[in-house]
């Protein structure tokens, strides 16, 4: 991604780095000293674009969904998977350390919560969880809406945020439901299960984020189950499957 003309860069410091399982790390960020904090204001579901100094004279711009909630988390964070041979993610994974300052474009993106009071259904696969984790926390913290999250990951110990999501479900019993599908043992989500989940709910707004083939299958199944297209939101970035 190139830097859009006229958009100011904001300086962010890495506050801490959290290991989320194999090859996934969360980078907790804060405005660098002297940098305007309001430039890091964000809405749940948005993304941040970092300028990463992978080589002295060749920085790369890479976008990352924000995995935190602007209401319930004290700082903004992004969660990154190492892509083999990928310059940006590998720089973050191997070279970035707490205290380091990076440049970023201010948060942006349209994958944000609708303003209705309908139930919310979230379908995530792999690292597609990042914006949906943000939306889930935000919906629970700022509304009375019911949230159901269907989350596919290969194995429990390599699937980010499972413990935190189970904790959220316990804290919001009756309002939040987590359906974790471990595809390494249970196989991949299929259209019949998508239909069963959505028809058990009361006209939800649905958000879908994962590899393109996953997103396509879930959206097709939702539409085939009679859900109106306007009630189905997908991650418009269409991120490549290898980063999920
Ligand atoms: C809106 C948005 C949100 C995103 N959110 C997240 C997120 O939350 N977490 C996350 O981890 N990522 C996210 N991404 C993806 C992220 O921006 C980067 O694309 C990702 O980190 C990989 O960047 P990279 O520089 O490491 O690798 P890239 O340069 O993008 O390459 C990725 C992979 O492709 C291979 N490759 C590149 N070029 C070639 C080629 N010509 N031939 C063969 N192989 C090639 C590389 O070796 C590497 O394995 C998001 C992207 C967008 C657009």
Image (tube, rainbow, N blue to C red):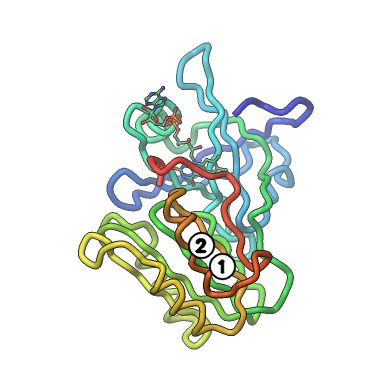
CB under 8 Å between discs 2 and 1: yes
| Disc on res. 223 | 1
Residue sitting farthest toward the front:
224
Residue 32 lies, in percent from the top left, at 62, 37
**Would you say residue 155 is visible in this rendering?**
yes
Q: In percent of the image, x 67 and y 26: which residue is there? A: 3
Q: Quadrant of residue 140?
A: bottom right
- For label 2, the residue is 220
Residue sitting farthest toward the right:
6
Residue 213's place in the image compared with 63, above or below, is below
Q: In percent of the image, x 53 and y 74: which residue is there? A: 225
Q: Quadrant of residue 82?
A: top left
Secondary structure under the numbered disc 2 in the rendered image: helix
Q: Is residue 83 left or right of residue 69?
A: left
Residue 43 lies, in percent from the top left, at 67, 56
Q: Is residue 20 left or right of residue 231?
A: left
């Amino acid at each position: 991604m190139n830097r859009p003309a006229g958009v100011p860069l904001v300086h962010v410091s890495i506050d801490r780095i959290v290991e989320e399982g194999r090859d996934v790390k969360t980078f907790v960020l804060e405005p660098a000293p002297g940098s305007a904090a309001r430039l890091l204001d964000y809405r749940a579901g948005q993304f941040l674009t970092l300028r990463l100094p992978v080589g002295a004279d060749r920085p790369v711009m890479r976008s990352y969904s924000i995995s935190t909630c602007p209401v319930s988390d004290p700082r903004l964070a992004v969660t990154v998977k190492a892509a083999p041979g990928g310059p940006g993610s590998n720089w973050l994974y191997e070279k970035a350390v707490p205290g380091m300052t990076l440049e970023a474009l201010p948060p942006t993106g349209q994958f944000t919560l609708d303003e209705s009071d309908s139930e919310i259904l979230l379908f995530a696969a792999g690292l597609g969880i990042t914006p949906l984790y943000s939306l889930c926390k935000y919906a629970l913290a700022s509304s009375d809406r019911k949230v159901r999250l269907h989350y596919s990951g290969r194995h429990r110990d390599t699937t980010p945020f499972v413990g935190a999501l189970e904790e959220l479900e316990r804290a919001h019993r009756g309002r939040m439901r987590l359906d974790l599908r471990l595809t390494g043992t249970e196989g991949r989500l299929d259209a019949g299960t998508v239909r069963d989940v959505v028809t058990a709910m009361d006209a939800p707004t649905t958000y879908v984020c994962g590899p393109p083939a996953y997103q396509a299958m879930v959206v097709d199944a939702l539409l085939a189950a009679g859900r109106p297209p306007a009630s189905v939101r997908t991650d418009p970035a269409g991120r490549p499957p290898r980063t999920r």
